[in-house]
Amino acid sequence: KSKRAKRQEFEQMQAPSLGGVQVPRGDGNTAIRLRRGSSLADFADKIDANPASLVTVLFHLGEMATATQSLDEDTFGTLAAELGYVIEMVSAEDEDRELLEAFDIDLEGEEAGESDDDLAARPPVVTVMGHVDHGKTRLLDAIRNADVVSGEAGGITQHIGAYQVKTQVDGNERALTFIDTPGHEAFTAMRARGAQVTDIAILVVAADDGVMPQTVEALNHAQAAGVPIVVAVNKVDKDTANPAKIRQQLTEYNLVAEEYGGDTMFVDVSAKQNMGIDSLLEAVVLTADAALDLRANPNKDARGVAIEANLDKGRGAVATVLVQSGTLHVGDAIVAGTAHGRVRAMFDEHGNTLKAAGPARPVMVLGLTSVPRAGDGFLVAPDDRTARQIAEKREAAERAALLAKRRKRISLEDFTQALEQGKVETLNLVLKGDVSGAVEALEDALLKINVGDEVDLRIIHRGVGAITQNDVNLATVDNAIIIGFNVKTAERVAELADREGIDIRYYSIIYKAIEDVEAALKGMLKPEYEEVQLGTAEIREVFRSSKFGNIAGSIVRSGEIRRNSKARVLRDGVVLGDNLTIDSLKRFKDDATEVREGFECGIGLGSFNDLQVGDTIETWEMREKPRS
């Protein structure tokens, strides 16, 4: 053979034909690392193949995609298995770490190089958790002497707030940072995030109510985060209070009170009567001193977490951030998730301006270009340009990952069936809220609604702030409903929505929104029908008629026989004729519309004449089944 022929033969062995396309093939163990939301072009670069050839291969595997379309992990897995590769998706954390390392920001390396001399004591970060209406917010009111309860819809905390208070312990003034996480069950995601940034959890249990489902849920979050727990037994001033019962109930969840020989501090308090508050704060400080080494390096660039963020009409994006290490200064360039900017001003919980904020200090920051999500980590970048580049790269990665997640995997066969059966009904939503945590929690709760595979729920956009013209335009294009959570429309937007026929719903309590969306989804379902038996009749005699065919002289055995209803004829339990219609119904010589149980009648079944004495005529109708 010539050298050229041998080379062609070798290339064919290396790159077997899939759908007539030559593609380099792996050995079955070759690992390919891909970022979230990668496209076929990215995969082609990794294996040195032509992206167009991968599009063809994927088509032959029953998947349709373009070379630049973001794909999900399952699709890449199918393609890789066919070509002899193994896909390793880079996690969001690793992706972010690699991104920061590209800008010479190594958070882990910084911490590894810190000595004991660099570290200074910091206040404990405390999260107040517990069941709805057990008095968490009132307890925080008593601690910080502020009235938050009265301003909340339905008495339910819908935001995360952070505050720092001071208390006297053994003659020393000690600071504590409190995070108030919402108590309603729909805010599980936010409450879980509260447990991740906290050092100590205060579990509030009402002495007159006992351990409830969300008490257990909050307890699980705290234990999963590995944080010490102090139990505040609230409402002990009530006549029906039973603090001993609470202690007994919580032993089932590995929280054994000190008086029972355990290591968990239980404090009886009454937020309403301002009883036991000092004892609770002291218990928190003592637990922190005994169980935790709370130190951080204040002499470096700050990093921490965004506790909450919202869009203020006059001040722009406002974020409440908790500094976890380092010191944040006015003028620092910061990145929080996909938001970036320069710290223009900082305020404490009382609205006083600050120049610097050290570890465990919650502050309100102005100067970000957009609103970060609740729970996004923030860090100080060397300069504005670096901060912007990090935020833009994060945003691009998130957008690609979101596109991959949204993409519906559908084979050619499925696609043909979908066309034949009529398209899947989809309810499109645009979510707008006053703070990012509430929007995220609402989205999380809505996506958990399950009414079957026939109806699909898509959230095409979510954002913080008033409902704008862009939101209405987006809803117009995608036929969406806009849900405003604690926000209203901007100027002249309501008129535009009315003109375009866009439905805008306003809510201040989350479960009302969930109920309405669930009802809407159920309303979009195609009705389901079931067969309901109306009556049966036994044939006693058959009358022959040249004009009307055979007439069944019958007696109604059950229910009633109606004219024009559907019928079937059974002989010895076997169906002889189905989907018939009762054409004529007579009582003696008179026409009848219906004949009830126990009465005799003459039944005509049109052209069906195979009738014998002893046969049963059964009538039925299709009724719509109510959705559960």
Image (cartoon, grey):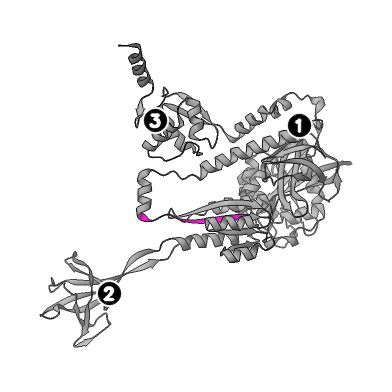
* Sequence order check, earlier mark of 1 and 3: 3
Residue at image location 86% in from the left, 41% down from the top = 355
| Left or right of 209 on screen, residue 361 | right
Q: Residue at x 82, y 47 (%)?
A: 348
- x then y, percent, for residue 428: 53, 55
Under tag 3, what secondary structure? helix
Magenta region, residue range: 421-431
Identified by mark 3, the residue type is Glu
Q: What's the amino acid at mark 2?
A: Ser
Q: Quadrant of the N terminus?
A: top left
Q: CA distance from mark 1 to mark 2?
A: 81 Å
Q: Which residue is mark 2?
A: 565
Q: Nearest the camera: 619 or 109?
A: 109
- Label 2 to label 3: alpha-carbon separation: 57 Å
User: Does residue 8 sit above or below 190 in this rendering?
Assistant: above
Indicate the position of residue 559 as horizontal and vertical percent values: 29, 76
The disc at residue 382 is 1
Is the residue marked by circle 1 packed among few (<14), some (14-19), or many (20+) residues within 10 Å? some
Residue 198 visible here: no
Characterize the magenta stretch by its predominant secondary structure.
strand
**Which element type, helix, strand or loop, lies under badge 1?**
loop
Q: Nearer the N terminus, badge 1 or badge 2?
A: 1
Where does label 3 land, which residue? 82
* Residue at the bottom extreme of this rendering: 589
Crowding at label 3, few (<14), some or many (≥20) Cα neighbours within 10 Å? some
Q: Is residue 228 magenta?
A: no
Q: What x and y, as percent, mark residue 213?
A: 60, 53
Q: Relative to 250, is 425 above or below? A: below
